[in-house]
Image: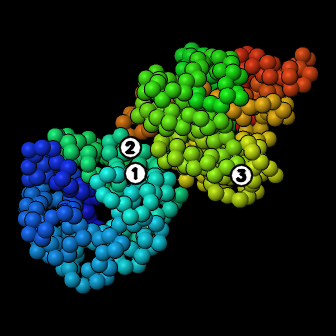
Amino acid sequence: MKNPRSIDYSIYLVTGRELLPAKKAYGDFLREALEGGVTIVQVREKNADTAEFLRIANESKRLCGEYDVPLIINDRIDIALAVNADGVHLGQTDMPVDVARTLLPPGTIIGVSCNNVDHVRKAVQDGADYVGIGAVWPTNTKQLTSAILGVRAVGPLLAALDGTCLKAVAIGGIKSSNLLRTLHGSVSNTGHRLDGVAVISEIVTSPEPSKVANNLRESYRRWSNLTGQSSPSYTTDTIKDAVSDLLRVTKETKPLIHQITNIVVANQSANATLALGASPIMASAPEEMYDLSRVLGALLVNFGTIKDKEAMLLAGQFANDAKKPVVFDPVGVGATGFRRRVAAELLNTWQASVIKGNAGELAALADSEEVNAKGVDSIGVGFADPVRFVKDLARKERCVVALTGVTDWVSDGTTVVKLSNGHSLLGDITGSGCLVGTCIATFCAAASELGNNEDGIAKLVKGDMLMGAVGGIMALSIAGERAALRPDVQGSGTFLPALIDELYNLTPDRIKEHGNVEVITG
């Protein structure tokens, strides 16, 4: 019997014979999957009678034994006992863990399906060895009895395992195309990560299960190795230098900035993109999203007027696949339940590189009542502790968070940067917040360009997205200050074209001279 604490749960295969390709024998499939590197196998036979289940379990036990891979039996303790399996997996309506423990040999692995924090706490209390968290994605391989969790809901369940020896695997609809999204997004605020992923259909349905299993295991290995890397350190001078370099790269490479944005600001956003030296495209047809993802420098999703949800979903997925930055501007997200639901769907489908919003918008995303919103505007004085807020939200959303206002706060969950440029006239023109999103996307494209030499296999985006977000905010804020001082600016009507002019005339030296930057430590 395997020691439960020494089990490698990284690529957890759940079988499903009904999904096998035509003429593919179960034994051949399982041997190939084991050769490919699956690290643990669960046999699930929902429709087989006892004799058939026992035959499959015996065959599985023999093959798993050859590769020294643990065998788990789903639900059936009698089958597990009959074949001397390494463990059982129990659902919420199956035999309780403590009862199963009395029937099984000492050291037997017991896993439990969990869909909420209470399930996890009960599994800890009952002495389970691991939990299967899900379903994370929609799946056709099992009739679900609970709502789909979504990637962003996994973190709180993992946090409930802090201080325990229990392992955790995510399950439900996981495949190569969403593996990195699942691994990257399924991390708690405390840094608790998944120990593995359960995969069914992608391996079982493949004519080459060994190749699929090997690719999954290699992707998991690279991601696991990447998570141990430390974050860079920043100073005021290194930030100004980095942002200046990003402006230079933007003007040299002229990246394509794909913007799915609202009709109110499309024209001025395109002009701001051009002024910085990049190239805008305002495309929203779903049929174009894949082709654009192959050539874009960055994607901006701004849902001030939500009309293109399908395009937003596809564009973000394809951008993640292409390792390109995705900037999300949840305009007015707290105004309606519809906006909240769409934002949740988008953020569960793809991984944002940067989320930018005012206090009211980000409070809505964080389910905080500290700051309220009226439509697209934030109400009140803001957060009592903006440093803690942006750092916590960045950890929760697993991306850079930019809180905009009179003072701007940007964090990647480790570092917090305070930015104090800007002018009150920026608040007097329509869409100045949306222009910030455009500028952030442009600078993130440059950051991605500089990160092209990075090993991106285990990443959803290359480059320093913290500097991209900081750079975009600095560019617009400094341009706003300079525009407001011009003698031809008499009010908001003359301020907007002057702002575009100042973006056009922005230089690396002006960023270094005028940037008001502070790095918050501790």
Q: Distance between the residues labelled 2 and 3?
A: 32 Å
Identified at 52% across, 35% down, the residue is 312
Label 1, on which residue? 137
Q: What residue type is labelled 2?
A: Asn
Most foreground residue, 168 or 249: 168
Q: Which of marks 1 and 2 is in front?
A: 1
Q: What residue type is labelled 3?
A: Pro
Most foreground residue, 73 or 218: 73
Identified at 36% across, 72% down, the residue is 92
Numbered disc 3: secondary structure: helix
Label 2, on which residue? 178
* Disc 3 crowd, CA 10 A, few/some/many (<14, 14-19, 20+): some
Q: In which quarter of the image is residue 284?
A: top right
Contact flag, marks 1 and 2 (Cβ < 8 Å)? yes
Numbered disc 2: secondary structure: helix
> Residue 264: image x %, image y %?
71, 29
